[in-house]
Image (tube, grey):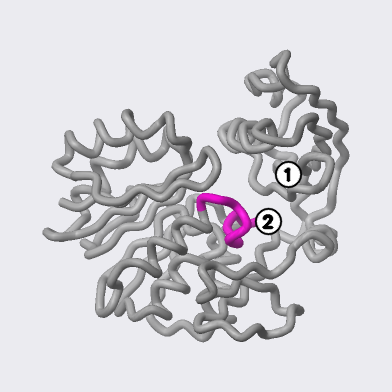
Amino acid sequence: MSNTIYIGYDFIVKPLQPATEILIAELGYAGFESFVENEEGVTAYIQKDEWNSSVLEDIQILNSNEFEISFSYQEIEQTNWNQEWEKNFKPIIVDDLVSVRAPFHKKPDAKYDLVIEPKMSFGTGHHETTHMMIQHILKNDFKNKAVLDMGCGTGVLAILAEKVGAAKLDAVDIDNWCYLNSMENVERNNCKHISVYEGDVSVLKNKYDVIIANINRNILLQDISEYAKHLNSDGSLFLSGFYKEDIPKIEEECNKNMLTIKEIIERGRWVSLKFIN
């Protein structure tokens, strides 16, 4: 992994919102893995092996007359990434209960202190979707539950789920870097009940009381039927990674699989939903 090369795109966005949110979502669909927002826009990273000169062709917002977006790009050695996120990654507090910080940040006075070294992985709590999923975990009962964190990224949601009482947890991500990073963060937070796997829904073998999936809309729509198969009766499914206008499609697919919407959390244009069976 140490020899992996990334391409970093620096986007200057005017006005910043909602254009930056839309841009990040579209770049995520196109294969970009990590994003660092700043005062002028966002820097987005994609593995050089996944990159080609037409990678931005399907990014519709770049053709919008509503926003002015310019960009430049360059190759970035993965070993330089720590410097990039250390400059931009600041600790956050969610609902005065959960802190998400890097190892070099001072330990705050919070009930749940999560130490995350994100590197190239998605999921620090800074993005609205991760923030809302943390809120769902705080609001719901995870004690002694079997939990799946699908598309785990940094492992932050599985780590919090264990800290609030989950008994057995599986964390799964299709990306090798996320898989390795999640294992590091699980160990860093002294978690004892989390197993990390590399792959997609095809690796699932167990059934769960709670399934967490913070992925993009298209993957969710494709995999909801599989989540339903792996959910115990009276189970809960938490979904995020999509916009408010996507709720009807997500709800329709969940209803087909006997899942009923129970809670909605909104943050900007992003939403996070709880379904029960």
Q: Nearer the viewer, residue 4 or 35?
A: 35
Residue 135, position as x, y percentages in the image: 44, 62
Residue at image coords 28%, 78%: 143
Q: Nearer the viewer, residue 109 or 120?
A: 109
Q: Main secondary structure of the magenta part?
A: loop
Q: Indicate yes or no whether the magenta region holds residue 119.
A: no
Give the residue at mark 1: 45
Residue type indicated by callout 1: Tyr
| Image position of 252 with respect to 147: above or below | above
| Image position of 127 with respect to 58: above or below | below
Which residues are drawn in magenta? 121-129
Residue 184: mark in rendering? none
Q: Secondary structure at mark 1?
A: strand
Q: Nearer the viewer, residue 265 or 151?
A: 265
Residue at image coords 51%, 50%: 129
Q: Nearer the viewer, residue 193 or 66?
A: 66
Visible in this render: residue 129? yes
Residue at image coords 35%, 67%: 139
Visible in this render: residue 200? no
Residue at image coords 46%, 73%: 160
| Mark 1, other Cα within 10 Å: few <14 / some 14–19 / many ≥20 | many
Marks 2 and 1: CB-CB under 8 Å?
Answer: yes
Give the residue at mark 2: 120
Q: Secondary structure at mark 2?
A: loop
